[in-house]
Amino acid sequence: MQNCDELKNKFQALGINIQDKNSLQKLEYVKILPILCELYEQDKLTLDTIYLDLNINKDRFLRDFAVFKGFEFQALKEYNPYFLSKLSLKQMKECQCLVFQEDENFIYLAFAKIPSNELLDKLQASFKHKFIKIFLANPSKIENFIEKYSLECEINDLIAELKIELTHSDKKDKSAVAKLFELICLQAIKLRASDIHFEPSSEEALIRFRIDGLLGVFLRVELEIYHALILYIKLLAHLNIAETRKAQDGSFVMEFEGLEYDFRLSSLPLLYAESLVLRILKRKQKFLSLENLEFEAKSLQLFCQSIQLPFGMILVTGPTGSGKSTTLYAAMSEIQNENKKIISVEDPVEYRLSLVQQILLNPKAGLDFNNALRAILRQDPDVIMIGEMRDEQSLDIAVKSALTGHLVFSTLHTNDAVSAISRMLDMKAKPYLLASALTLIIAQRLVRKLCKHCKEKVSIEFEGVKEEFFEARGCEYCRQSGFVGREVVAEFLFIDTNLAEMIRENKSKNELLAYARKQGFKTMFELGLAKVRLGVTSLQELLRVLR
């Protein structure tokens, strides 16, 4: 509960203890509405407290607050830049209001707060031929609309400037294309995007951001602007700008708001032009500790014990983008110290770790996975991290390394933990060697987390039983997606003596799974369902990821 002594005192006068959940659930909304309105108007109570602590829908309260103060409420469902342009950006930001509609006689204004008469007179002077009509709206939604409109204006100004530059060769300190690209990157970082996709078609080009694993359109540009952007980005990455028929890879570093970011670039020739994808990686990334990865408590304890072993092989499996690297980096961060030599083989090196000797592969120079692995073993390492086991040879070296006194971390692309054993056997791993080398297999996925500001409890029939789950609704905080951030769902298959013997005897996947379940093994779906019941994610999101 937000620290508001006045709220506590006023509620206690009504016989309501706001520290008591049962008391909160029995609140008579009509009875407490005047108190909430008074404190909200005085900025002593926030909308977040009203929703998160008192479980009162924000729009419902704002609608009632508006009526209580003699105004109408506006939900502001549609963003319309035409109406927003009726006021200058400076006016919108200063007055925290915007135009959302107009007719023959009126201009309709939505305010974040109750406006003063002086402010209304000032705004009326801006519309000499029409009267202004006042509404109240959600302050966060007004702020988001103004921010979105401001960004659109800035982008349009830069595109117009760039068009002039393309026809005139006047040199400036910083070109419009550089400013436009930096603006795109800054917005991607603010929105927590992991990738920026530049995709051409016959008539226009899309710039899309991948946020929490899903792609969404950020901007549409003309092909003339797109080609200028692509040329500039390729120059930044030191690629051959004359080569447009072959795929190329590159990288560059940029700084935003005092932080450095690595951008990994991949270009691909398409029918109309080149497509580019930029992966965004923050330098000096603070990795989540294993305790903060939200693993099941018992599995986490055994995992921490496993990474302290002097030898063995620990695998993390899952599709691309399932957080495998994050788990491995968190594990290495946990065990790195001056008494251990840790060497990693990666392509590419995603993040830099202190006290870890990181090898960036260069196949053109003859430094591929297998050559690097052989060289590593002559460097007397304690721990080896292999970015990915790609073929029989790299798997064979990894298994033998685990058997000769090294702790080996690696990744594999399989759907679940038990399938990883079958995959390695298919890759010609000898069952008796694999049984002795394997310590732990983790299979994981990332699910989007429900926005705590707008998630709603619903009754859903699941497997013949009605249960109460939470589902996504969408609000200004999550940009109407219903989700903010992601969380890992992971199953842990620990290789004990009996399971190792079953691998040695080449038992089937079903037999391995049946034994593991008897020992308490839980599948990703079961663990994900527990997170659904806790309100971390939705059932629909879990089924989307694990379908």
Image: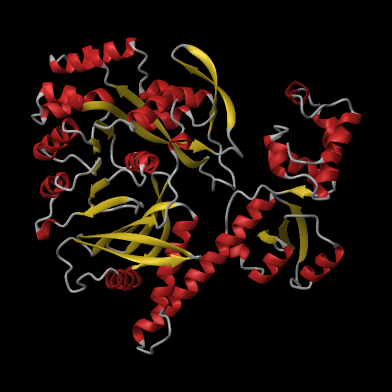
Up/down of 25 relative to 42, above or below: above
- In the rendered structure, the answer to whether residue 293 lies left or right of residue 381 reads right
Front one among 440 and 379: 379
- In the rendered structure, the answer to whether residue 29 lies left or right of residue 174 reads right
Front one among 244 and 8: 8
Q: In which quarter of the image is the C terminus?
A: top left
Q: Quadrant of the N terminus?
A: top right
Tell me what residue is drawn at x 43 percent, y 71 percent: 180
Tell me what residue is drawn at x 88 percent, y 29 percent: 12
* Residue that protrudes farthest toward the bottom in the picture: 170
Tell me what residue is drawn at x 44 percent, y 73 percent: 179
Up/down of 376 relative to 158, above or below: above
The number of numbered badges drawn on the structure is: 0
Q: Can residue 162 be seen in this view?
A: yes
The part of the image, by quadrant, that contains residue 388 is: top left
* Residue that protrudes farthest toward the right in the picture: 13
The part of the image, by quadrant, that contains residue 17 is: top right
Front one among 419 and 405: 405
- x, y percent for residue 83: 62, 63
Q: Is residue 88 visible?
A: no
**What kind of colouring is applied to the model shown?**
secondary structure
- x, y percent for residue 401: 16, 36
- x, y percent for residue 476: 59, 48
Front one among 230 and 24: 24
Up/down of 180 relative to 334, above or below: below
- In the rendered structure, the answer to whether residue 76 lies left or right of residue 244 reads right
* Residue that protrudes farthest toward the front in the picture: 339
Tell me what residue is drawn at x 27 percent, y 62 percent: 202
The part of the image, by quadrant, that contains residue 516 is: top left
- x, y percent for residue 45: 78, 44
- In the rendered structure, the answer to whether residue 337 lies left or right of residue 132 reads left
